[in-house]
Image: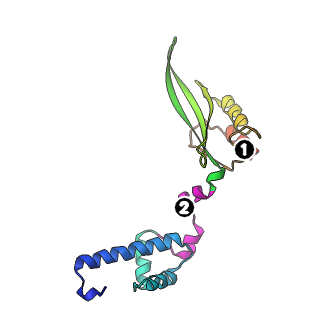
Amino acid sequence: MDRDFASPCAVLQMDEEIERLIVRMARENSSWGYDRIVGAMANLGHKVSHQTVGNILKRHDIPPAPKRKQSTSWKDFIRAHMAVMVATGFFTAEVLTFKGLKTYYVLFFIRLESRKICWAGVTCHPDQEWMEQIARNVTMEQTGILANCRYLLHDRDSKYCPSFRQLIEAEK
C-alpha cells in the first residue's frame, strides 16, 4: 500500500497492525533482537527502522532481547511446570450445630495439570499439629497427592506454619 495516497484512517490502521506484529514477534521469539525483527518485518513487506522497533517494544514494556531471553513470565513458568505443580487453599463453611454456628476450615489440594482435587481435611481449629499431620498425609509415597510434585503453591496464610512447609520440603 502506498502511504502517499492512503487515507489517514488506513495509515493509522496499518501502523496499529505493524505495532501488533512487532510486539507479537518479540513476545514469541525471545532471542530476536531489533535487527532480526526489522528483517522479519521486511520479509513481510513492512519497512521499519531499528529505532521504531525499539520505541514500540519500550512502549509495551518489553525489554531488549538478552534481558527478554533471561526472564520467564509467571504464565510461561506455570505452563512449563504444570505437570509437577500443586496448589492448596482453604475455604470455610458455616455449620449450624446444637451449640450454635461453627466455622469449619476445609483444606484442599489441586493438581494443576489434571485438575484432580484432594480434600485433605476439615477442622474447626487448623492448628500446627493438624497441619503437620496433613503434610505427612499428602506427602505419602504411594497415595499422597504431592507424590511426584515439585512445586506447591499457597498463599501467605499463617495456617501454613513453618513446620508444615519443612515437612513438605523434606519429602521433595
Other-residue count near label 1 (Cα within 10 Å), few / some / many at <14 / 14–19 / ≥20: some
In what quadrant of the picture does the N terminus appear? bottom left
Image quadrant in which you'd find residue 138: top right
**Res 97 label:** none
Name the residue that disc number 2 marks. Answer: 73
Instruction: Determine the residue positioned at 56% across, 29% down.
Output: 105
The mark that comes first in sequence, 1 or 2, is 2
* Residue 119 in sight here: yes
Asked if residue 78 is among those painted magenta in the image, a careful observer would answer yes
Instruction: Determine the residue positioned at 57% across, 63% down.
Output: 72
Outermost residue on the top side: it is 98
Report the span colored magenta: 62-80
Name the residue that disc number 1 marks. Answer: 147
Residue 11 spot, x, y in % from top left = 28, 79
- 6 and 132: which one is in front? 6
Q: Give, as a three-letter code, the residue at label 1.
A: Ala
Residue 88 spot, x, y in % from top left = 59, 41
Q: Secondary structure at mark 2?
A: loop
Residue 23 spot, x, y in % from top left = 44, 72
